[in-house]
Amino acid sequence: MELTSLFGAHPEWFGPFTVLAFGAAYLTAVVVGYRRGWPPAAWLLVLAAAGIGGVVGTRLLPLGLDGLRALWLDGALPNAGVRRLPGTIVGALVAAEAARRLLGVRRSMLDPLASAGLVGIAVARVGCLLAGCCFGTPTDGPWGVTYAAGSFVHGFHLAHGVVEGGAAGPAPVHPIPLYDIAFALVVLALLPRLARRLRAPGSLCGAVVGLYAVHRFAQDFVRANEVTAWGGLTAVQVGMAAAAALALGAVLWAERRERGGAAESWGGADRAEPAPLRLVAVLGVVVALRLALDGWLTSAEAAVLLIRIVPAAGAVAVALVRSPAAAPLRWAAAGVAGALPLVVGFQTEPAAEPFSLWAVEAHGDLGRYEEFDICDTDLYQYATAGAGVARIWVDPKAGRTREIGVRVYGGRQEVVVGDDGPPRPGDEGGAFGAVHPYVRVEGRNAGASLGLQVGRVPALGPEATTVLPSAGLRLGPRRAHFLAGFMDVPHFGPPAPAVHIGAGTGRLTADGQELRLTGGVSGSGFYVAGTIPAGRLFLEPMGAVASSNGDWIYQGGVRLRLHLPAE
């Protein structure tokens, strides 16, 4: 199969690559800010605000005057089927700068968004290439790309007479996504050299925005399906010309002030967290804005924003605990800040008629745990893998699901450190495996699961049993709930010390999947687990870590689940 046969043949991958792009950009920005020594709570709040601004900007830019008029007069958020990368950039920068000012941080915090944005562009455009949503005008050049037969490009060419009705595929076109990927990678490679030349805070980001505006201005001459607005230029080109002039002009002005000694750079005093009241206020604004968008976002966008808001809330809670206020006030404020994201949750989807489906899954975990005995303590490490199948009955109107399934898993564990010398033969713990039939019922305000593990089921240490029950419990609505469990596979199963308690947020999707983002305490330490949707495919990562007696114990795992229609 030729590589080009993939281009435009997989529109379903646009959403997952969008989520991946936002995630990669976010992680890049977090790392860069951490290396610069910036205050974590303030920086993560700025990134959360940038995420909201980016999602809103990418939707608002294509709306046009009619959509904006409806937003202004009716207070309604019109749906936008088209996304625009320039809108993402403008929205993210405006929101980040507004959050920085509200926090009272005097120096610009935009520079890390330059590298983050370039990484995001490179990843997102891979999705565009596979989906066929962005493409250029026809070309005879050797760089032209032929999209797959039946793709959106093929339909566009048939509708506009570019190819005849019997054509097997579309004509070769300018590969717009590849142009963007090449631009992002080249500028990313030149970024360190550019950073050494630009001294004023914010100049690096301004320079990258200006370069992108110039790139996009030139690109629109060979971009298909763009409408001429004025003087032979598209509306995007007019905007990009203005953006390039403003961004590059601001860079020149800032650098001139910096070399004249008028600009201020980051100092030690600026690396302290803002006042607690400012942190809580900005977090409240971010959560309020996210709630205002409820029902307007796609599942992928909601997940992206939640991933940004939760770490920001955690960092604010830590900053409040470390603040000099009275202890009861510190802990109360920290609890409120940490719980704020739970009211965000995922937006609900329109109710549908009851249906059933099959779910198949594969999962794996690895980690370390301590076995405590009267006389000694041993450190074990383990790895497990398994698969399962389940039948699920879903009643969306009632918000209820019933699931009956069976999982099979196996693995191996061994002693890493023992108090009584090196591991002896027989101390390893050896191989294990079990069959795990279970039943799970979820309602609007509560849920529970019960199961039985049969086989060679490892308890803590080398001992094993033949039968071990499992149980899980959720109390509260999906949007904000508490949960607890014991040995409920896949993530909290043997041989890890898998009693856990925590809190979470989530929703029931139209496909019958329970989407959740949870955190709490388990026998493996503090844990975070979540669900990343990609159509009918769901990725569920989990991680836990703690320190005990000078040793690190941890657990990491992932479950991949695919939903299939029962009929």
Image: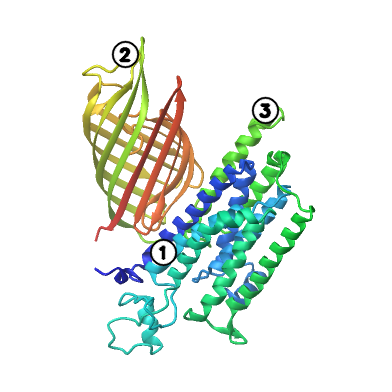
Label 3 Cα crowd, 10 Å radius (few <14 / some 14-19 / many 20+) = few
**Disc 1 marks which amino acid?**
Val
Q: Position of residue 271 (x, y in %)?
A: 68, 40
Label 3, on which residue? 328
Percent coordinates x, y for residue 8 in the rendering: 36, 71
Marks 2/3: CA distance? Answer: 46 Å
In this view, 357 is above or below 487: below
The correct choice, above or below, for 167 with respect to 343 in the image is below
Q: Is 476 left or right of 47, judged from the image as shown?
A: left
**Left or right of residue 348: residue 150:** left
Where is mark 2, residue-wise? 421
Judge by depth and name the residue closer to the eye, 534 or 440.
Answer: 534
Q: Is residue 280 left or right of residue 221?
A: right
- The quadrant in which residue 370 appears is top left
Tell me the residue that label 1 is attached to.
Answer: 126
Q: Quadrant of the C terminus?
A: bottom left
Dot 1: element: helix
Mark 3–mark 1 contact, CB under 8 Å? no
Q: Are marks 1 and 2 in contact (CB under 8 Å)?
A: no
